Image: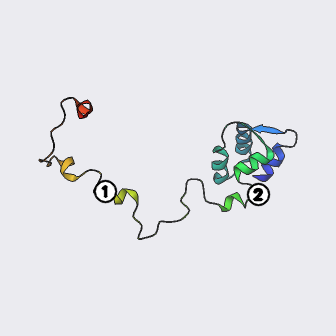
Amino acid sequence: MEELLNGLYLAQDRISAAEIRRAALAADLPAEAMVRIDALPEGEYAEDEAAEALGIGSGDVNDRPPLGQPDAEPEPDEEDFAAEHETTAVDKDITTGDDTDREPESPRGWAGSD
């Protein structure tokens, strides 16, 4: 990807994200590199700005995990949010219709709660 940027900036000071994407597609870069390029916000970039936005210079981009992937697996004793709230969000009695001791609903909906 660094070679691609070097070639693009030979004759220009600033290049749009769309031009970088087109050049990357033509160069048939690996999927991991394309994910980073596709994540570039629209606009024009100087070479150093594009390199920073794409993470070039801070290690080989292909050695890093793709964007959106967790850095590590959660600890085995850590419960995730969904599991933690599985029984507290909606009680089974409510979803099955067995909730017989409910408060009556307001005839005016939320407006009746004032």
The single residue placed furthest to the front in the displayed view is 114
Q: Which residue shows up at 67% across the image and 37% down it? A: 42
Give the x, y percent position of residue 54.
Answer: 70, 50
Residue indicated by mark 1: 86
Q: Position of residue 3 (x, y in %)?
A: 80, 52
Q: Position of residue 60 (x, y in %)?
A: 72, 60
Whether 61 is drawn above or below 24: the answer is: below
| Mark 2 element type | loop
Q: On the rendered structure, is 104 left or right of 74? A: left
Give the residue type that dot 2 points to: Gly
| Vertical arrangement, residue 24 with respect to residue 32, above or below | above
Q: Nearer the viewer's eye, disc 1 or disc 2?
A: 1
Question: Which of the pair 31/77 is nearer the observer?
Answer: 77
Residue in the image at 83% along x and 48% along y:
6
Secondary structure, mark 1, is loop
Label for residue 34?
Answer: none
As drawn, 57 above or below 112: below
Residue position marked by numbered label 2 in the rendering: 57
The disc labelled 1 sits on which kind of residue? Glu
Instruction: Tell whether 72 sits left or right of 27.
Output: left
Q: Which residue is drawn at the image coordinates 64% and 54% (left, top)?
A: 32
Q: Quadrant of residue 39?
A: top right
Residue lying furthest left? 100
Q: Is residue 22 above or below residue 91?
A: above
Crowding at mark 2 (Cα within 10 Å: few <14, some 14-19, many 20+)? few
* Mark before the other along the chain sequence, 1 or 2: 2
